[in-house]
Image (cartoon, rainbow, N blue to C red):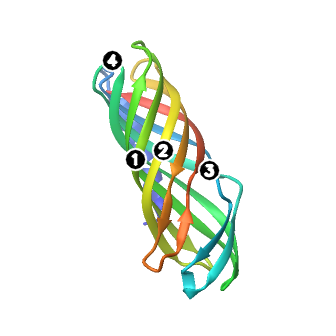
Amino acid sequence: MRTHTIYKLITVLMCTLGLSVTAFAQNNVITVKAGSYAMSDTSQSITGFFGGTVATTFEDDSSTFGVEYDRMMNNHVSIGGGFQSYTIDYTASGAVSGTGEMEAIFVTFNSKYHFTEGNFKPFIGGAAGIAVTDFSGPLIGNTAGLALGIMAGFRWQFSTVGLYAEYKAYVAAETEDDGNAEVDLAGDSITAGLSFAF
């Protein structure tokens, strides 16, 4: 089953869960979001794939999708986790050449501080976890590494369903494989979506 099919299935399940909840509460929140992702370094020299060096140019930006869970610990602090992914085309030249696709996935633990106690909650926060890639095309392989991010945004909860918007910067996301092929996934995302409280 392709990864995108799994994401779509998760989205449908989350939406169904959120819309079926009749009692409104602020303790548990699931957010489904989408937007754009821009890598900080779109031109990278990758050494290790096929035993050579490959000059790789990634597209300027890509669409991104994510799902998060937040547990409100009190009126201001929440902890939780989630994943975010994007797929981006690349052009390679050197040891191998051609065009292909890289899928990147972040799985992180998140903590947020909410400035207000009402239904409109602007926040700042941090994220820490892992990032992995899956290359297809002239480059074939996977890399993995630690990811650190910071974020700011808001959640505006009307009832069970609310609106969510977020800016997130992955300030560190260097990944590598067993052959020391390194790919830097650091970048910025701007997303918006729906939050479901239960």
- In percent of the image, x 57 and y 74: which residue is there? 136
Q: Amino acid at mark 3?
A: Ser
**Which residue is identified by label 4?**
75
- Nearer to me, 2 or 165: 165
**Which residue is identified by label 1?**
128
The picture quadrant where one finds residue 82 is top left
The reply to whether discs 2 and 1 touch (Cβ–Cβ < 8 Å) is yes
Q: Position of residue 31 (x, y in %)?
A: 43, 36
Circle 1 SS class:
strand
Q: Nearer the viewer, mark 1 or mark 4?
A: 1
Circle 4 SS class:
loop
Q: Nearer the viewer, mark 2 or mark 3?
A: 2
Kindly identify which numbered label has been placed on residue 50: none
The picture quadrant where one finds residue 69 is top left
Say above or below: 110 vs 3. Answer: above
Circle 2 SS class:
strand
Determine whether, in the image, residue 79 is placed left or right of residue 133: left
Q: Gap between marks 1 and 4, in whole Å?
A: 23 Å
- In percent of the image, x 48 and y 44: which residue is there? 149
The reply to whether discs 4 and 2 touch (Cβ–Cβ < 8 Å) is no
Callout 1: few (<14), some (14-19), or many (20+) C-alpha neighbours within 10 Å? many
**Which residue is identified by label 3?**
63
**Which residue is identified by label 2?**
149
Q: Amino acid at mark 2?
A: Gly
Q: Gap between marks 3 and 1, in whole Å?
A: 21 Å
